[in-house]
Image (cartoon, helix red, strand yellow):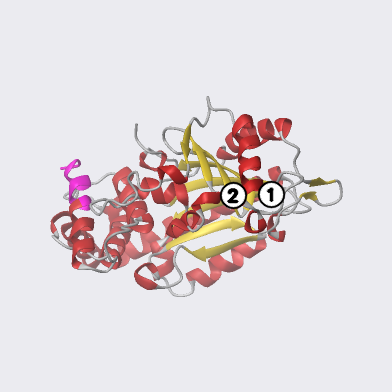
Amino acid sequence: MSMWYERFGKEQDVVLSTKAFIVRNIKGYNFPDKMSDSDFDSLTEQIDKAVDKSVTGNVWSPNALGSGTESGDSLLTPESQLFGMNMTLLRHPEHKRIYYNDDAGLSVVVGSGEHLTVRAMAAGYEPSVYSKAEAIAVDLERKLDMAYSDRYGFLTSNLKLTGTGFKMLYTVAIPAISKSNGALTTLRQRVGQYYWDIYPFAEQGELGNSGVYIITNVSTMGVSEDEIIKRGEKLLNDIIQFERALREKVATKNKIQTSDMYGRAYGLLRYASTISRKEAIDALSWLRVFKEYDDQGEVNVSWEKINKLTQDVCWEFIPTIKRGSADAAAIRAAKIKTILKGDD
């Protein structure tokens, strides 16, 4: 079965993914950072009985560590998407457990910041993922005694999540906005008007100027889930229209130059024997900017492939090879070439 992020997604030329997170804590236990081994065992036993295995039947636990996460010839995007950015869930694996479905689009994470994190993820622009996460959360709330205050809502170790305990995250690829003078500042102001936040996928390093950003809600207290979702929908529609308008401007103002960058970018991705993350993400940005204006049709690559490659580069994790090494660059190039061959 293909992973959730490999599938067709709505508005996929701009929106890479939509993710809904709902966090909950159970009464009678310390937060995970202060939890003893015996309390964790007791907590996980309760949760294990409560989780609906017909929905999330696969389980990752400390005993599974190493079953695929230490291979040096893989970009391991499924695992890094499942465990989290930089594999942070692996720092204390003895206090972690993940229940997930076959395509990893639905999961229940135990012990990552809060006792429970319910996650639903989909390719492209898909705000309906919230209803999938909510269904799992409501089922768990019926079976477990959640920490809840009539005044504050659901109680969390992270005060920013107290209230609804709900976060919606959109990952967007906006190279035209990133490349246009003043456009990113304008976008930040627009995002703030909706009481949302925008930040780069990576603050520094090879992906520091990737043009990939995270858009997420700020408020979780004093605002309903429906309000959060509606504000996000309006904001994302604004972003999509803004990015597409700027792509048209960039692509048509200097069409010969932009077309040349587009062709060179595809050639690098398709034929390079080694490629850095920066080179790969820059090339993918040019494909994204000019794809809809390629009236010659010389480059045959689908949006699904562009998005998969973008997510692979952003989320890759090569645990046994230094990321900037020649071996890592060769592995990356080989994977990219294999994916693009399918469109030839």
Residue 339 counted in the magenta span? yes
Range of magenta residues: 335-344
**Residue 283 location in percent, x, y?**
26, 62
Question: In the figure, is residue 206 to the left or right of 86?
Answer: left
- Identify the disc placed on residue 111: 2
Name the dominant secondary structure of the magenta segment: helix
Q: Nearer the viewer, residue 102 or 131?
A: 102
The residue under label 1 is 165
Mark 2, secondary structure of its residue: strand
Which residue corresponds to the image point at 52% horizontal and 39% vertical from the top-left? 107
**Residue 194 location in percent, x, y?**
66, 58
Q: Nearer the viewer, residue 154 or 282?
A: 154
Q: Nearer the viewer, residue 258 or 39?
A: 39
- Identify the disc placed on residue 7: none
Q: What quarter of the picture does the N terminus occupy?
A: top left
Few, some or many residues within 10 Å of mark 1 (<14, 14–19, 20+): many
The relative height of residue 43 versus residue 336 in the rendered view (above or below) is: above
Q: Amino acid at mark 1?
A: Gly
Mark 1, secondary structure of its residue: loop
**Residue 162 location in percent, x, y?**
73, 54
